[in-house]
Amino acid sequence: MKIAILGATSAIAKDLILSFSDEHKLELYSRRISDVTTWMVENNLRNFTSQSYTEFKHARDIDAIINFVGAGSPEKVIKLGQQIFEITESFDQMALDYIGKYRDCKYIFISSGAVFGDNFSTPADIDKVSAFPLNDLQPKHYYGYAKAMAEVRHRITDRNIFDLRVFNYFSPMVNINYRYMITDMIRSIKDKTMYKVDRTPIVRDYVGPLDFYQMINVLLKHDKMNTAVDMYSRQPISKDSLLTAMAQRYKLEYETTGIPVGLPATGVKEKYYSVNTAAYALGYRPTLSSVENIFLAVDKILK
């Protein structure tokens, strides 16, 4: 299968590329061609090509497009601001134009749980409604709203499109300097400093490269579908349980404070995960729980 990867510099894209190995012929598109080329050489990847986005208009015989283009970190979400609308739409339209000409081509758009807004007092399910305060739209809503607008564009076509909503993804490829809860913990472990965390009770669901690769393969095998699918692990984890696990396994020292910490670029979400298991009917079977995914990644990072 010949697959075009848009946004090949992202950590999640690199994990998938490595998982594919020589299984498919990949065309990798990015702004930083030399960075991707160097990374390919370092990882002995020979069956792939590194190209600029401008070259995509010349692409032919593509069986599937996977679009990873996005912000990638809380810091970048904040920095981009309203530019995220233009970036999301322009690269999405690039893929839509291609599958408009070549109708047998599949399109997998990497979306986000943020499409539902920031109301996560309960997890996402099959009936969850997307809600944004249009009379008071704030920067924290931009990322999710841009993804939601893309999903709407996809639903009103008859093309073969999957919107894959990723809630939380973690792997050794992630930059530990980013301001996620889990990366803040890792830096405290490495630096042997006290991790200060607020008392807000939250639940997260972390998927990793193994189950993400499985999900992508499941979607690639299905033709003539136009739908959204939620990504999920075998079991989510609460912040308190994660803190306990990290303290036991990695000697994380932490203290709770009443002051919010971290960088919630898309708003504070109490139960940011999905119980919509529609992907099960397609053949997806998550193999790892959130804590297992985290342990696999952190073990490698600390080594």
Image (tube, rainbow, N blue to C red):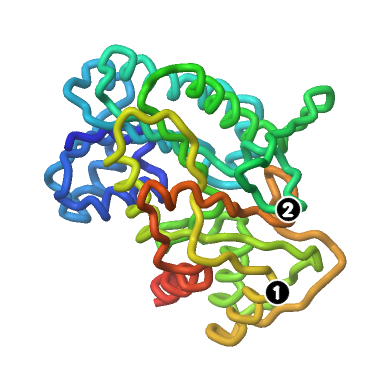
Quadrant of the rendering where the C terminus is positioned? bottom left
Q: Is mark 2 on a helix, strand or loop?
A: loop
Q: Mark 2 points at which residue?
A: 122
Along the polypeptide, which appears first: circle 1 or circle 2?
Answer: 2
Q: Position of residue 252 (x, y in %)?
A: 62, 81
Residue nearer the viewer, 14 or 269: 269
Residue nearer the viewer, 133 or 266: 133
Q: Residues within 10 Å of mark 2 (few under 14, many from 20)?
A: some
Residue 89 higher or lower than 68, as above or below: above
Q: Where is residue 32 in the image (x, y as percent from the top left)?
A: 35, 35
Residue at 56% x, 49% y is: 276
Which kind of residue does numbered mark 2 sit on? Thr
Residue at the limit of the structure toward the front, as seen here? 281
Q: Mark 1 points at which residue?
A: 240
Residue at 51% x, 52% y is: 277
Q: Is residue 180 left or right of residue 56?
A: right
> Total label count?
2
Q: In this view, does 157 lie to the left or right of 132?
A: left
Residue at 41% x, 18% y is: 158
Residue at 51% x, 46% y is: 230
Q: Where is residue 35 in the image (x, y as percent from the top left)?
A: 31, 42
Residue at the limit of the structure toward the top, as seen here? 101
**Residue 288 image-quadrant placement:** bottom left
Quadrant of the rendering where the N terminus is positioned? top left
Q: Residues within 10 Å of mark 1 (few under 14, many from 20)?
A: some
Q: Where is residue 213 in the image (x, y as percent from the top left)?
A: 33, 53
Q: In this view, does 138 lie to the left or right of 213?
A: right
Q: Is mark 1 on a helix, strand or loop?
A: helix
